[in-house]
């Protein structure tokens, strides 16, 4: 499992706190920036991480901005991305079980780092259920194709 992690200035501190959690889970990671708190534009980092997932360079992505909303909007524009903005464990679990989410989005200014770590662990240790949910993902793929 290899993961791309990225954020804007509002997510740097949370990103730095999550890297040891990835190490704990033995997940290989690559930091796509940003690396300090100087103001940047979240679409630049959201696009890079999402493209790496879309092209199969990494297996999954993690994105963090202030609310998580901007990063979610960006990530879900990229082909094949199913990004889930999660503020609690239940959504993290369901986004894997039912949606096979391949990008986890976290809100750096809304939840604390401890909660973010818990969400991250849940998200990486929950597998997609398949079955009836696969049919729904296929429909999402069809919509994506129609929009090309
Ligand atoms: C940056 O100030 C903030 O707008 C950004 O981190 C994010 O919350 C956007 O959705």
Image (cartoon, rainbow, N blue to C red):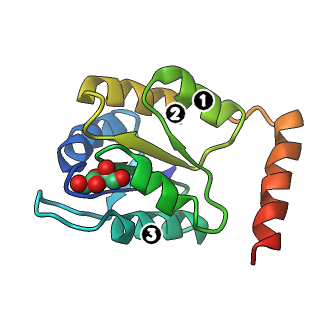
Secondary structure of the residue carrying numbered label 2: helix
Q: What residue is disc 3 on? A: 47
Q: Quadrant of the C terminus?
A: bottom right
Q: Nearer the viewer, residue 36 or 19?
A: 36
Q: What residue is disc 1 on? A: 126
CB contact under 8 Å: marks 3 and 2: no
Category of crowding for the residue at label 2, using alpha-carbon neighbours closer than 10 angstroms: few (below 14), some (14–19), many (at least 20): many
Measured as percent of width and height from the top left, residue 40 is found at: 21, 67
Give me the residue at 89% from left, 35% from top: 132
Q: What residue is disc 2 on? A: 123
Q: Nearer the viewer, mark 3 or mark 1?
A: 3
Q: Is residue 146 left or right of residue 81?
A: right
Give me the residue at 48% from left, 44% from top: 104
Measured as percent of width and height from the top left, residue 84 is found at: 54, 43
Label 3 to label 1: alpha-carbon separation: 25 Å
Secondary structure of the residue carrying numbered label 1: loop
Label 1 to label 2: alpha-carbon separation: 6 Å
Measured as percent of width and height from the top left, residue 86 is found at: 47, 34
Give me the residue at 10% from left, 63% from top: 38
CB contact under 8 Å: marks 1 and 2: yes
Residue 95, quarter of the rendered image? top right
Q: Is residue 36 left or right of residue 129?
A: left
Q: Which of marks 3 and 2 is in front?
A: 3
């Amino acid at each position: 499992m290899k993961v791309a992690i990225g954020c804007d200035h509002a997510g740097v501190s949370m990103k730095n706190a999550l890297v040891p959690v990835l190490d704990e889970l033995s997940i290989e990671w690559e930091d796509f920036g940003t690396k300090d708190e100087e103001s940047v534009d979240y679409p630049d980092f959201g696009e890079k991480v999402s493209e790496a997932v879309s092209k199969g360079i990494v297996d999954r992505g993690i994105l963090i901005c202030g609310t998580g909303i901007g990063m979610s909007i960006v990530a879900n524009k990229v082909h094949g991305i199913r990004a889930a903005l999660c503020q609690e464990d239940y959504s993290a679990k369901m986004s894997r079980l039912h949606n096979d989410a391949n990008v986890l989005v976290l809100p750096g200014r809304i939840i604390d780092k401890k909660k973010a770590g818990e969400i991250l662990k849940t998200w990486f240790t929950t597998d997609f259920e398949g079955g009836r949910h696969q049919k729904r993902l296929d429909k999402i793929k069809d919509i994506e194709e129609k929009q090309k």
